[in-house]
Amino acid sequence: MIDVTAIKVGTRLKLEADIVAGVVENMDDGQWLQVRYLESPARPGDVGTVELCHAQDVVEVLSD
């Protein structure tokens, strides 16, 4: 599990299921981030969706 406490708004993340998401808000609790889906190969209709993401779903920090 990646430590999400230092992840800033605007950082791009790779999530489970090859989803790429941008951080909209860091909840500063070490567990949750609010993200916007930028790429979602399995479910293209989810692109643009904003939802909460748990730290355990973060596979890689791509950039900020």
Image: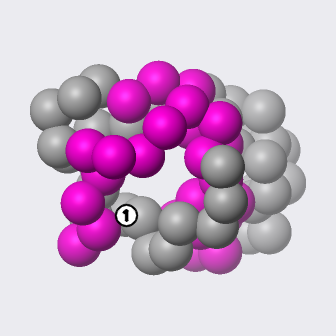
Q: Secondary structure at mark 1?
A: helix
Horizontally, residue 31 falls left or right of residue 11, namely: left
Q: Position of residue 3 (x, y in %)?
A: 24, 60
Residue under the image location 17 percent in, 43 percent down: 30
Q: Is residue 5 magenta?
A: yes
Q: Position of residue 32 (x, y in %)?
A: 28, 38
Q: Quadrant of the N terminus?
A: bottom left
Specify few, some or many for label 1: CA neighbours under 10 Å numbering under 14, 14-19, or 20 or more: some
Q: Position of residue 52 (x, y in %)?
A: 41, 34
Horizontally, residue 13 falls left or right of residue 42, namely: left
Q: Which residue is mark 1?
A: 57
Nearest the eye: 47 or 43: 47
Q: Is residue 17 magenta?
A: yes
Residue 27 drawn above or below residue 39:
above
Q: Position of residue 20 (x, y in %)?
A: 69, 60
Residue under the image location 29 percent in, 25 percent down: 27
| Segment tinted magenta in the rendering | 1-26
Residue 51 visible here: no
Q: Quadrant of residue 63?
A: bottom right
Q: Quadrant of residue 45?
A: top right
- Figure coloring: one colour
Three-letter amino acid code at disc 1?
Asp
Residue 31 visible here: yes
Residue under the image location 50 percent in, 74 percent down: 60
